Amino acid sequence: MEIQNIHPSWMEFMDTNMELLEKVMTKMEEYPKELIYPSNENIFRVFQMGINEIRVVLLGQDPYHGPGQANGLSFSVNNDIRIPPSLKNIYKELNSEYEERNYEYTHGDLTRWFEIEKIFLLNSSLTVLDGKAGIFMKDWEQFTDKVIEKIQKDNDRCIFLLMGNFSIKKMELIENKDRCVTCVHPSPLSANRGFFGSGVFREVEEKLAENIDWSI
Protein backbone atom coordinates (compact mmCIF):
# COMPACT_ATOMS: atom_id res chain seq x y z
CA MET A 1 0.00 0.00 0.00
CA GLU A 2 1.31 3.43 -0.98
CA ILE A 3 0.70 6.31 1.40
CA GLN A 4 1.20 9.65 -0.30
CA ASN A 5 1.51 13.28 0.77
CA ILE A 6 2.27 12.72 4.42
CA HIS A 7 4.75 14.74 6.45
CA PRO A 8 8.27 13.23 6.63
CA SER A 9 8.00 13.01 10.44
CA TRP A 10 5.41 10.24 10.01
CA MET A 11 7.28 8.12 7.46
CA GLU A 12 9.13 5.84 9.87
CA PHE A 13 5.97 5.37 11.95
CA MET A 14 4.00 4.35 8.87
CA ASP A 15 6.68 1.88 7.82
CA THR A 16 6.79 0.37 11.29
CA ASN A 17 3.02 -0.11 11.34
CA MET A 18 2.57 -1.18 7.73
CA GLU A 19 1.35 -4.63 8.73
CA LEU A 20 -1.54 -3.09 10.68
CA LEU A 21 -2.37 -0.79 7.79
CA GLU A 22 -2.37 -3.62 5.28
CA LYS A 23 -4.83 -5.59 7.42
CA VAL A 24 -7.23 -2.63 7.40
CA MET A 25 -6.88 -2.15 3.67
CA THR A 26 -7.53 -5.84 3.07
CA LYS A 27 -10.76 -5.56 5.07
CA MET A 28 -11.82 -2.52 3.05
CA GLU A 29 -11.28 -4.38 -0.21
CA GLU A 30 -14.35 -6.48 0.64
CA TYR A 31 -16.55 -3.46 -0.16
CA PRO A 32 -17.07 -1.27 -3.24
CA LYS A 33 -14.48 1.49 -3.23
CA GLU A 34 -17.05 4.19 -4.00
CA LEU A 35 -18.97 3.37 -0.80
CA ILE A 36 -15.96 3.95 1.46
CA TYR A 37 -15.50 7.45 2.91
CA PRO A 38 -13.51 9.62 2.79
CA SER A 39 -12.09 9.35 -0.71
CA ASN A 40 -8.79 7.51 -1.00
CA GLU A 41 -6.66 10.67 -1.24
CA ASN A 42 -8.08 11.97 2.06
CA ILE A 43 -7.78 8.84 4.23
CA PHE A 44 -4.37 9.92 5.56
CA ARG A 45 -4.94 13.66 5.16
CA VAL A 46 -4.37 14.45 8.83
CA PHE A 47 -0.80 13.13 8.57
CA GLN A 48 0.15 16.03 6.33
CA MET A 49 0.86 17.84 9.61
CA GLY A 50 4.26 17.30 11.20
CA ILE A 51 4.28 15.78 14.67
CA ASN A 52 6.06 18.73 16.24
CA GLU A 53 3.69 21.23 14.59
CA ILE A 54 0.67 19.91 16.50
CA ARG A 55 -0.78 22.30 19.09
CA VAL A 56 -4.04 20.49 19.84
CA VAL A 57 -5.23 16.96 19.13
CA LEU A 58 -9.00 16.99 18.65
CA LEU A 59 -10.07 13.37 18.67
CA GLY A 60 -13.18 12.21 16.86
CA GLN A 61 -14.57 8.72 16.64
CA ASP A 62 -15.70 7.87 13.12
CA PRO A 63 -15.84 9.72 9.78
CA TYR A 64 -19.26 10.92 8.67
CA HIS A 65 -20.98 8.11 6.78
CA GLY A 66 -23.10 10.09 4.30
CA PRO A 67 -22.11 10.82 0.69
CA GLY A 68 -19.76 13.78 0.33
CA GLN A 69 -19.44 14.45 4.05
CA ALA A 70 -16.13 13.00 5.27
CA ASN A 71 -13.03 14.94 4.21
CA GLY A 72 -10.30 13.30 6.29
CA LEU A 73 -10.50 15.66 9.28
CA SER A 74 -12.50 14.89 12.43
CA PHE A 75 -15.76 16.85 12.84
CA SER A 76 -15.14 18.57 9.48
CA VAL A 77 -17.14 18.51 6.25
CA ASN A 78 -16.59 20.29 2.94
CA ASN A 79 -18.07 23.78 2.84
CA ASP A 80 -20.89 22.82 0.48
CA ILE A 81 -22.23 20.24 2.95
CA ARG A 82 -24.76 21.04 5.68
CA ILE A 83 -23.07 21.60 9.05
CA PRO A 84 -23.47 18.41 11.15
CA PRO A 85 -25.28 18.72 14.50
CA SER A 86 -22.22 18.04 16.71
CA LEU A 87 -20.19 20.68 14.89
CA LYS A 88 -23.07 23.14 15.18
CA ASN A 89 -22.92 22.63 18.94
CA ILE A 90 -19.14 23.13 18.94
CA TYR A 91 -19.68 26.44 17.14
CA LYS A 92 -22.42 27.38 19.62
CA GLU A 93 -20.12 26.77 22.58
CA LEU A 94 -17.28 28.71 20.95
CA ASN A 95 -19.56 31.68 20.38
CA SER A 96 -20.70 31.48 24.00
CA GLU A 97 -17.16 31.35 25.38
CA TYR A 98 -15.80 34.04 23.06
CA GLU A 99 -18.59 36.56 22.50
CA GLU A 100 -15.99 39.30 22.11
CA ARG A 101 -14.34 37.56 19.15
CA ASN A 102 -17.50 37.69 17.00
CA TYR A 103 -16.95 34.36 15.30
CA GLU A 104 -19.24 33.66 12.35
CA TYR A 105 -19.71 30.05 11.32
CA THR A 106 -21.30 29.62 7.91
CA HIS A 107 -19.92 26.22 6.89
CA GLY A 108 -18.36 23.10 8.39
CA ASP A 109 -14.94 22.98 6.72
CA LEU A 110 -12.29 22.99 9.46
CA THR A 111 -9.33 23.12 7.07
CA ARG A 112 -8.21 26.44 8.55
CA TRP A 113 -8.07 24.94 12.05
CA PHE A 114 -5.92 22.17 10.63
CA GLU A 115 -3.60 24.12 8.35
CA ILE A 116 -3.20 27.41 10.25
CA GLU A 117 -3.98 26.70 13.90
CA LYS A 118 -2.30 23.26 13.78
CA ILE A 119 -5.21 21.38 15.31
CA PHE A 120 -4.71 17.68 14.55
CA LEU A 121 -8.22 16.56 13.64
CA LEU A 122 -7.85 12.81 14.12
CA ASN A 123 -10.60 10.21 13.94
CA SER A 124 -10.07 6.89 15.72
CA SER A 125 -11.32 5.20 12.55
CA LEU A 126 -9.95 6.68 9.34
CA THR A 127 -12.64 5.22 7.09
CA VAL A 128 -16.31 4.30 7.17
CA LEU A 129 -18.77 2.53 4.87
CA ASP A 130 -21.76 4.38 3.44
CA GLY A 131 -24.49 4.33 6.07
CA LYS A 132 -22.54 1.95 8.35
CA ALA A 133 -21.09 3.94 11.23
CA GLY A 134 -18.24 2.26 13.07
CA ILE A 135 -17.85 -0.65 10.65
CA PHE A 136 -14.06 -0.30 10.43
CA MET A 137 -13.49 0.99 13.97
CA LYS A 138 -11.97 -2.20 15.41
CA ASP A 139 -9.72 -2.48 12.37
CA TRP A 140 -8.35 1.06 12.68
CA GLU A 141 -8.27 1.55 16.43
CA GLN A 142 -5.06 -0.33 17.12
CA PHE A 143 -3.29 1.88 14.58
CA THR A 144 -4.77 5.20 15.72
CA ASP A 145 -4.07 4.37 19.36
CA LYS A 146 -0.42 4.09 18.33
CA VAL A 147 -0.75 7.48 16.65
CA ILE A 148 -1.86 9.02 19.95
CA GLU A 149 1.01 7.33 21.79
CA LYS A 150 3.46 8.60 19.18
CA ILE A 151 2.25 12.19 19.48
CA GLN A 152 2.30 12.25 23.28
CA LYS A 153 5.82 10.84 23.24
CA ASP A 154 7.36 13.01 20.52
CA ASN A 155 5.49 16.29 21.11
CA ASP A 156 5.60 17.38 24.74
CA ARG A 157 3.65 20.63 24.36
CA CYS A 158 0.43 19.77 22.56
CA ILE A 159 -2.93 19.45 24.31
CA PHE A 160 -5.40 16.59 23.85
CA LEU A 161 -9.05 17.64 23.63
CA LEU A 162 -11.17 14.57 24.42
CA MET A 163 -14.92 15.01 24.07
CA GLY A 164 -17.24 12.21 25.17
CA ASN A 165 -16.67 8.87 26.89
CA PHE A 166 -15.11 7.19 23.87
CA SER A 167 -12.39 9.82 23.54
CA ILE A 168 -11.88 10.22 27.29
CA LYS A 169 -10.92 6.54 27.50
CA LYS A 170 -7.89 7.39 25.36
CA MET A 171 -6.38 9.17 28.37
CA GLU A 172 -4.87 5.82 29.30
CA LEU A 173 -2.56 6.24 26.29
CA ILE A 174 -1.32 9.64 27.46
CA GLU A 175 1.30 9.62 30.18
CA ASN A 176 0.85 13.22 31.36
CA LYS A 177 -2.85 13.56 32.15
CA ASP A 178 -2.41 17.30 32.72
CA ARG A 179 -2.18 17.64 28.95
CA CYS A 180 -5.77 16.40 28.58
CA VAL A 181 -8.91 18.50 28.47
CA THR A 182 -12.12 16.46 28.71
CA CYS A 183 -15.80 17.22 28.38
CA VAL A 184 -19.18 15.80 27.41
CA HIS A 185 -19.60 15.00 23.72
CA PRO A 186 -21.18 17.85 21.70
CA SER A 187 -23.78 15.63 20.02
CA PRO A 188 -27.45 16.67 20.38
CA LEU A 189 -27.99 13.64 22.63
CA SER A 190 -25.53 14.81 25.26
CA ALA A 191 -24.57 18.47 24.73
CA ASN A 192 -27.12 19.73 27.26
CA ARG A 193 -25.66 17.42 29.91
CA GLY A 194 -22.46 19.37 30.37
CA PHE A 195 -20.95 20.39 27.06
CA PHE A 196 -22.72 23.72 26.83
CA GLY A 197 -21.22 26.08 29.37
CA SER A 198 -18.18 23.86 29.96
CA GLY A 199 -15.61 26.48 28.98
CA VAL A 200 -13.64 23.68 27.38
CA PHE A 201 -12.07 25.77 24.62
CA ARG A 202 -10.83 28.40 27.06
CA GLU A 203 -9.35 25.56 29.11
CA VAL A 204 -7.48 24.34 26.03
CA GLU A 205 -6.01 27.80 25.47
CA GLU A 206 -5.07 28.10 29.14
CA LYS A 207 -3.22 24.78 29.15
CA LEU A 208 -1.57 25.62 25.84
CA ALA A 209 -0.67 29.09 27.17
CA GLU A 210 -1.53 30.46 23.72
CA ASN A 211 -4.60 31.83 22.02
CA ILE A 212 -6.22 29.89 19.21
CA ASP A 213 -8.14 31.59 16.44
CA TRP A 214 -11.22 29.38 16.21
CA SER A 215 -12.57 31.16 13.14
CA ILE A 216 -13.04 29.20 9.93
Image (tube, rainbow, N blue to C red):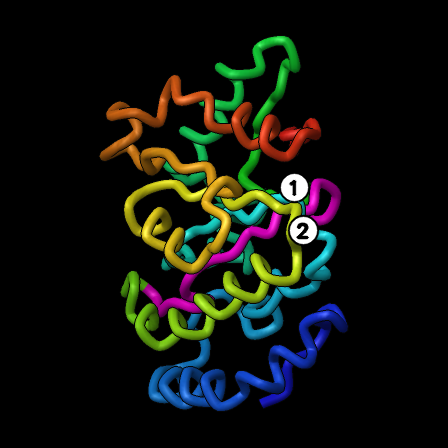
Q: CA distance from mark 2 to mark 1?
A: 11 Å
Relative to 42, residue 80 above or below: above
Whether 123 is among the magenta residues is yes
What amino acid is found at the position of numbered circle 2 in the picture? Ile
Q: Is 125 displayed left or right of 118 in the figure? A: left
Tell me what residue is drawn at x 75 percent, y 43 percent. 116
Q: Position of residue 64 (x, y in %)?
A: 40, 55
Look at the image and give the residue range highlighted in magenta: 114-130
Relative to 93, residue 100 above or below: above
Q: Position of residue 101 (x, y in %)?
A: 65, 15
How many neighbours does mark 1 have within 10 angstroms: few (below 14), some (14-19), or many (20 or more)? many
Q: Which residue is mark 2?
A: 54
Tell me what residue is drawn at x 42 percent, y 44 percent. 162
Look at the image and tell me whether residue 10 can be seen: yes
Q: Dividing the image into 4 quarters, which one contains the N terminus?
A: bottom right
Helix, strand or loop under label 1? helix
Tell me what residue is drawn at x 40 percent, y 37 percent. 182
Q: Position of residue 88 (x, y in %)?
A: 43, 31
Q: Quadrant of residue 135?
A: bottom left
**Which one is nearer the viewer's eye here, 72 or 148?**
148
How many neighbours does mark 2 have within 10 angstroms: few (below 14), some (14-19), or many (20 or more)? many
What amino acid is found at the position of numbered circle 1 in the picture? Trp
Count of number-bearing discs: 2
Relative to 170, residue 161 above or below: above
